[in-house]
Amino acid sequence: GEDVEQSLFLSVREGDSSVINCTYTDSSSTYLYWYKQEPGAGLQLLTYIFSNMDMKQDQRLTVLLNKKDKHLSLRIADTQTGDSAIYFCAEIRFSGGYNKLIFGAGTRLAVHP
Amino acid sequence: DVKVTQSSRYLVKRTGEKVFLECVQDMDHENMFWYRQDPGLGLRLIYFSYDVKMKEKGDIPEGYSVSREKKERFSLILESASTNQTSMYLCASSQFGAISGNTIYFGEGSWLTVV
């Protein structure tokens, strides 16, 4: 399909790991991104991975990339209440003569005690 | 720090009104964008601009226009607001060149309700 796809909701217990999954479409995307949106705010870049990498770790965040299946995941270790937010994956797609950032629908992560 | 400022955070407008959403960035960025965010649909690109007085249609330009008279300011215009334009609008900016997601900065969003 043409869309970047994510599941819409994820609920986890505080202290557990969260895994947010995404499938993308453009096999030529050089970078893939995860953005976080807290309530009432804009988007902040959380992390990104270059397409020649399989994994990137940054403190509690681990990004896994499976290029063959066009699958991207974000793992948050020791999930905290402050991690409650909407998480968007995004890819760069060349369309209409320009590079454009294409977003998934966003996964709302709810962290409960 | 880069700052992208959307002057109106919350607006309520009547059907048929003309609506202006203003965005200002302070980092001398060439590229500016307007996205619309709806639940379950993510962010969809309405218009973007890569230079003063230049504009390009995004994926959902119908019912919208834009203005970029100065480099730092990018305005989104709803000529005749309709209820299906009730949404959150996000402005973003980035440096010139191939757009990469790690150089794009977002404003905090403008919530528009059309009644």
Image: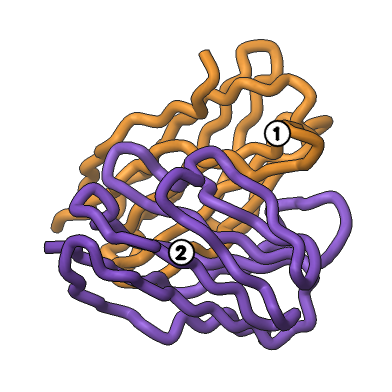
Nearer to me, B103 or A46: B103
Side of B18 relative to B65 (left or right): left
Image coords of residue A26 (percent x, y)? 68, 23
Side of B49 relative to A104 (left or right): right
Side of A5 relative to A59 (left or right): left
The quadrant in which the C terminus of chain A is found is: bottom left
Nearer to me, A1 or B53: B53
Indicate the amino acid at tag 1: Arg
Which residue occupies 70% across, 39% down?
A: A92
Nearer to me, A37 or A53: A37
> Rounded to the nearest whole Å, what is the CA distance between mark 1 and mark 2?
19 Å
Q: Which residue is mark 2?
A: B90
Residue B60 shows up from this direction: yes
Q: Chain of mark 1?
A: A
The numbered dot on residue A12 is: none
Asked where in the image residue A46 lies, by quadrant, the reply is bottom right
Tell me the shade of chain A.
Answer: orange
Asked where in the image residue A98 lies, by quadrant, the reply is top right
Tell me the shade of chain B.
Answer: purple
Q: Which residue is mark 1?
A: A93
